[in-house]
Amino acid sequence: MSIITRIKSAIGLEARSTLGVNGWPVPLSASAVTPTTAQSVSAVYACVQAISETTASLPLILFKRNGDDRERATDHPLYRVLHDQANPEQTAIEAREYMQACVLLRGNAFARIVRGWDGQVRELWPLNPDNVTVNRTSSGLVYDYTKDGVLTRLLSHEVLHLRHRLGDDGVLGISPIAAARGVVELAIAEREHGVGTFTNGAKLLGVLKFPGKLKPEQRTAIATSWASQHAGGGNAGRTAILEEGVDFQAVSMSLEDAEWIASRQFSVEEVARLFRVPPTIVGDLRHGNYSNSVELSRQFVTMTLRRHLVAWEQAIAAKCLTEAGRRTYFAEHQVEGLLRGDSANRAAFYSSGINDGWMLKSEARKLENFCAIDGLDSEPVSPSAPETPKGATPEQLSAKARPAPLPYPSKQKEAMA
């Protein structure tokens, strides 16, 4: 290994290469996939937004145990931090959305915990993961945060740390784009190929055929003139003027171009698989219909969001509550919030619970933020199917079972025939 190769390897510029056009080597850029470049791929951005927006928009409630029952701990300072305002500058949804996106793109999310005089959490300040270094010491983990050249050391109980899948070091998490860097790198390469094609190409995609041999300077002049008049999207559709017996032979889409389009579609599925997001959630409806879209939406909650929701709840219990507080309080997401914009499904959910006896009418009104009605739960529940009236005669029962008469006399005669 030469000294130049060692220097390149030390600073992360590996000299690996693959064969490009006509066998010429094309160097690979080291660490080309970053959170910023990864989000330039629409499928990656859509997956990150689908998970982070949904997770942050779900109500995160701090509950207080009361025997076998529970109630909202609205008088606890942490309730407002999780549900309303994370800090004086950011709302709860803004802070949680940013931290969840950091978990997906960088594998880790950090928030500085600010406590009051009584030791209760008063504020959560999200930190840029790129400026945080985690070290393991004899007394536990410490977090070194650098901002504007100033280094601040935070102890473990002062930082809310969310991780994606835990790495081998047992300290930091590994993001999906770091674990499967090649998937995103391929999607970026396909996108850049398309950008280059439509930037340098034109509607007049083809070959210029000359009757004689051209000199090198003639080739350069013709190529420059042709590119200035017909290359690029702004010159698309212009009419070409050919002289001296020049012939333009149009070239249709090659098989390589058709495979490029198919590979772009497959990259969407690959990225969705990487983040465990159903393709229909990110707008890929090629294989979606009404039946499987409903099922995929359910799987998005049970198989995609559940892991992230549990990670939030357990991290809050570990860092924002004391040992005594964990015996009394716990944080939980209200997944029913996903039905907030679907009135029909919410009504069916409440009706099923009330009729089957596992929900009270007052509880349904409370979930809808309606005011309470005295004595509502003491009223009998109306059955879903009409009951048979008491004292009904057999003639009345047979009349109820008889089908309704047909609207037209001619149809009645045909039915009786």
Image (tube, rainbow, N blue to C red):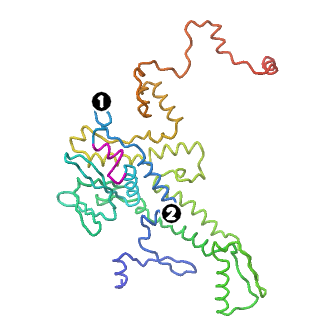
Report the front residue among 238 and 217: 238
Amino acid type assigned to the residue bearing label 1 in the image:
Asp
Quadrant housing residue 35 = bottom left
> Looking at the picture, does residue 18 appear above or below residue 391?
below
Q: Is residue 309 left or right of residue 226?
A: left
**Residue 81 lies in magenta, yes or no?**
yes
Q: Which residue is mark 1?
A: 68
- Residue 10 drawn above or below residue 133: below
Label 2 vs 1, first from the N-terminus: 2
- Residue 185 screen position, x and y as percent: 48, 67
Please report the bounds of the magenta region as a residue range. 77-90
Could you say where residue 37 lies in the image, as x and y percent from the top left?
46, 66
In the rendered image, which quarter contains the C terminus? top right
Q: Which residue in the protein does label 2 denote?
A: 41
Q: Residue at x 30, y 52 (%)?
A: 124
> Residue at (51%, 80%) from the top-left corner?
25
In the image, residue 125 lies in the stretch drawn in magenta: no
Asked if residue 18 is positioned above or below residue 86 in the image, the reply reads below
